[in-house]
Amino acid sequence: MKIIGIVILVLCFLITLALGAQNQEVVNFNYLVAQGEFRLSLLLGVVFGTGFAFGWLICGMLYLRARMSTAVLRKQVNKQRQELDKLRTDPVKE
């Protein structure tokens, strides 16, 4: 599964390089506080890199939250399993 992810990542990187090599025009880019003239290849690269970083950040946070939740639930299951084993081994009080 990791190999497929690496192949997709390399493929996206190569597509970005191909687009950058073909788009050397200077474009006017208006952003929130100002505007500037940038090469289209640079603009595409920055936008792609920013989107990639945000995607990794969001997925990483979701993965970390799931791992922490799993750890808490495993601890809870182990505690309940120990209690159940203790109840099974203790003699019945009459």
Image (cartoon, rainbow, N blue to C red):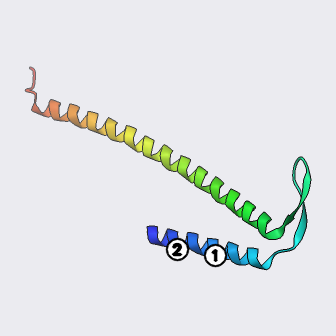
Instruction: Answer with the quarter of the image where residue 18 lies.
Output: bottom right
The residue shown at (32%, 37%) is 75
Determine whether 65 is above or below 90 in the image: below
Instruction: Answer with the quarter of the image where residue 51 lies.
Output: bottom right
Q: How far across and how far down the image is residue 8, in percent? A: 56, 72
Which of the image's four quarters has the C terminus? top left
Total labels drawn:
2
In the image: residue 94, left or right of residue 30: left
Q: Which mark is residue 7?
A: 2
Classify mark 1: residues with Cα within 10 Å, few (<14), some (14-19) or many (20+): few
Q: How far across and how far down the image is residue 78, in percent? A: 27, 38
In the image: residue 29, left or right of residue 2: right
Nearer mark to the viewer, of 1 and 2: 1
Determine whether 73 is above or below 28 in the image: above
The residue shown at (63%, 71%) is 13
Q: How far across and how far down the image is residue 89, in percent? A: 10, 32
Q: Could you tell me the amino acid type at mark 2?
A: Val
Q: Could you tell me the amino acid type at mark 1?
A: Leu
Which of the image's four quarters has the N terminus? bottom left
The residue shown at (22%, 31%) is 83
Q: How far across and how far down the image is residue 22, in percent? A: 78, 79
Spatial separation of the CA atoms under disc 1 and disc 2: 10 Å
Label pair 1/2, CB-CB below 8 angstroms: no
Between discs 1 and 2, the one toward the N terminus: 2
Classify mark 2: residues with Cα within 10 Å, few (<14), some (14-19) or many (20+): few
Say what secondary structure mark 2 lies in: helix
Say what secondary structure mark 1 lies in: helix
In the image: residue 40, left or right of residue 8: right
Q: Nearer the viewer, residue 25 or 93?
A: 25
Q: Which mark is residue 3?
A: none
Q: Which residue is mark 1?
A: 14
